[in-house]
Amino acid sequence: MAVSMADITKLRKMTGAGMMDCKNALTESEGDFDKAVEIIRKKGQAVAAKRSDRETSEGCVLAKSTGDYAAMIALKCETDFVAKNADFVALTQAILDAAIANKCQTIDEIKALPMGSGTIADAIVERSGITGEKTELDGFNFVSGPCTAVYNHMNKNQLCTIV
């Protein structure tokens, strides 16, 4: 089946996957976008499994406060190129927002929260498949009390604190 460039571009915008991955998924699914998304998701899981033993030395660290509850998370990856990517930072922010909204107390609680059509853990694996790098939720801290505040240093997403 011939796949149009418009379809490839549409699938790429939906998934963030590479052009060839989108083309191959559309060809394999015979033009069915839902099946193509599932194919890309499964491929991403396989990529993430292969990279599970790699070191994650870069990442994004963010903190946020609601006044009586503050949380800080670290989403780690292999390179600063990925850590500075807008989609990676947006995922980190979305995870932090979910943790704040649910006043989570452990990383496992955060990973189990719903995100998109799955959980946060699924979204992290999906991001790993898209970037081709190991991605993990590596750090989490929270404080609850009558007054909390946070500091995120200079918009670099590498240093923050809760006070």
Image (cartoon, rainbow, N blue to C red):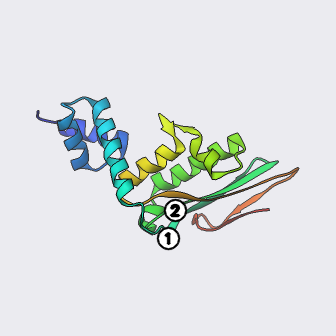
Q: Amino acid at mark 1?
A: Ser
Residue 35 appears at what percent x and percent y?
29, 32
Side of 116 relative to 45 (left or right): right
**Residue 116 shows up from this direction:** no
Earlier sequence position, callout 2 versus callout 1: 1
For label 2, the SS is strand
Residue 16 appears at what percent x and percent y?
36, 47
List the residue tagged with mark 1: 57
Categorize mark 1 by other alpha carbons within 10 Å: few (<14), some (14-19), many (20+). few
Given residues 33 and 104, the one toward you in this image is 104
Categorize mark 2 by other alpha carbons within 10 Å: few (<14), some (14-19), many (20+). many
Task: Tell me which residue sits at (18%, 31%) in the image.
Answer: 30
Q: Residue furthest left?
A: 1
Q: How many marks?
A: 2
Task: Tell me which residue sits at (69%, 41%) in the image.
Answer: 101
Q: Which mark is residue 76?
A: 2
Side of 133 relative to 146 (left or right): left
Task: Tell me which residue sits at (46%, 58%) in the image.
Answer: 135
Residue 149 appears at what percent x and percent y?
78, 57
Given residues 28 and 62, the one toward you in this image is 28
Q: Amino acid at mark 2?
A: Lys
Task: Tell me which residue sits at (58%, 48%) in the image.
Answer: 95
Q: Residue furthest right?
A: 146
Q: Quadrant of the C terminus?
A: bottom right
